[in-house]
Structures are given as structure tokens and as C-alpha cells.
Image (cartoon, rainbow, N blue to C red):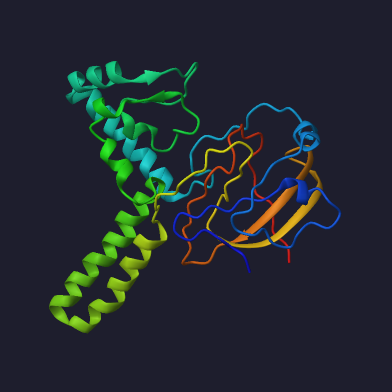
Amino acid sequence: MARVKKEGAEAVASLAQLAGPEPPALIPRGTRMTASASHQQSAPVRDSAPVVPIQPGGGWAIRLELLWARARRKYLRRARPGYVARALAARRGECPGCPHDVIDSRDLKLCANACGYWFPAAADPFAWRKAVPIARAGWAEVALFGGGAGLAAALALVIWPWGALLPALVGVFVVAFFRDPPRRIPAEPGVVVSPADGQVTDVTPIDWVEGFRGPAVRIGIYLSLFNVHVNRCPVAGTAVWCGTLRGGS
């Protein structure tokens, strides 16, 4: 089975192959993916999809982070107006009709994909966070579950050392699950990067996708619990539809 990943390797494939009547069962790692002109022209022109957070699935952890962010901004505006003024002066970019309340770079954590504001690294006291190899959208889970497991391991170590083994393993698993190792993204034209680590399971032409309103090619990638669970954009472009389709056998 062809594997997508392994320490900086990029998996790419040829859309010209996918357009044929017998699409390949697997995409070999390292194969270049170039879309034919007819395929590029067949895609319908659509407005961008209303993708708000970088984690569209949301969840209680995202809601908790949004609640904390609102409380933090309220505190900053009341207690540290000077900091707020300096941060807003350092802010760059444009976001016409912006629905995001952005004071500093922390407020871009969940909306950077849909907001035009940005902060230069030299004026951003939180730029170091980008170097942490943990997915920023998962920091809440890492802090709560990983930190909780670490605390339980520390307490168990005092009471019964062998009892610390299980919570310690749980803590390591949580951190590993949300890891975000650096990836080298190829810059060559016509190259498509695998959106996920894992194993390519199928390449299937689809005649009609309702949300997309047109044909598409589905590339199925299976992720185990031990794969990196960060999804990346395979190509530069505009997201025209965001939804969930029930999988099949």
C-alpha cells in the first residue's frame, strides 16, 4: 500500500490519470499531480464557502476557547488599554466587514483562514507559538487531557509509582495525537500535496457532488490513531463548499 507522508515526504498524483475510466487504486508517493485544462475548466465558479473556524467541526473545546478569548479581550480593553492600542497599531492587512474581534495574534488562532489581518513577527510577542509542534487548534485538549493525565501521573508517582504508568502513557498519547511536525511544501506549479498523513485507500471519480454542484474526484485517505491528524490544503484556491458526507464501505 502506498503511504502518504513519512517525515516530510509529500504525496502528489496526476489528475490526468484520475480522469480515465479506470482510475488507479492507489496514488504512489512522490507522483506529480497536474490537472488537465479540461478538468480545470469544468469546475463551476462559486463564491467562497462560509468557513469560519480553522476547525469546522467545532466542539466543546472550541467553544471553551472562544469563551476564554472573549473574556481576555474584555480584560485587555478595561485593564490594559495601552497594550490594546499598541497591538492594533501593529496589526496589518485588511478585513472588510470583518466579523472577527482581533486585538493581537492570539485572536487569529481560530480564524486565520478567513481573516485578512496579520501581525509581523517582529511586533508579535506571541510569534514563538508558531514554532511549537502542537496543532494550535488542539491546545485546549492538550492542556486539559494531557495536562490532567500528567497531573494524575505525578500524584500516582507519590502514592504508588506503578500507578503512574497508565496516566503517563495517556498524556504522551494526547500530545502525540495533536502533534504538528513541520512539512516541506513543494512550490512547483501543478503539484498537489496530500491533505493528510495516512494511507491512500481509494481514488474514485464522482459524477455529482450536491454541495459542489459538479463532478469531483474523491481521494480517500485512512488515518490511524497514530498518524498526524492535522489536515492541510492540498492546493492554493478558494473553498467553495464545506460539509460532511457519510462514508461507505
Q: Quarter-wise, where is residue 106 in the image?
A: top left
Q: Quarter-wise, where is residue 42 in the image?
A: top right
State how many labels appear: 0
Q: Residue 210 versus residue 33: which sits nearer the camera?
A: 33
Q: Which residue is located at x 59 percent, y 54 percent? A: 30
Q: Residue 68 versus residue 82: which sits nearer the camera?
A: 82
Q: Quadrant of the C terminus?
A: bottom right
Q: Which residue is located at x 77 percent, y 41 percent? A: 210
Q: Quadrant of the N terminus?
A: bottom right
Q: Residue 142 versus residue 203: which sits nearer the camera?
A: 203
Q: Which residue is located at x 29 percent, y 34 percent? A: 71
Q: Position of residue 233 (x, y in %)?
A: 55, 42
Left or right: where does residue 57 sit relative to residue 135?
right
Q: Position of residue 22 (x, y in %)?
A: 83, 58
Q: Which residue is located at x 23 percent, y 32 percent? A: 125
| Residue extending furthest toward the left | 158
Left or right: where does residue 218 sit relative to residue 101?
right
| Residue extending furthest toward the right | 21
Left or right: where does residue 135 sit relative to residue 3?
left
Q: Position of residue 43 (x, y in %)?
A: 76, 34
Q: Quarter-wise, where is residue 122 in the image?
A: top left
Q: Position of residue 137 (x, y in %)?
A: 41, 46
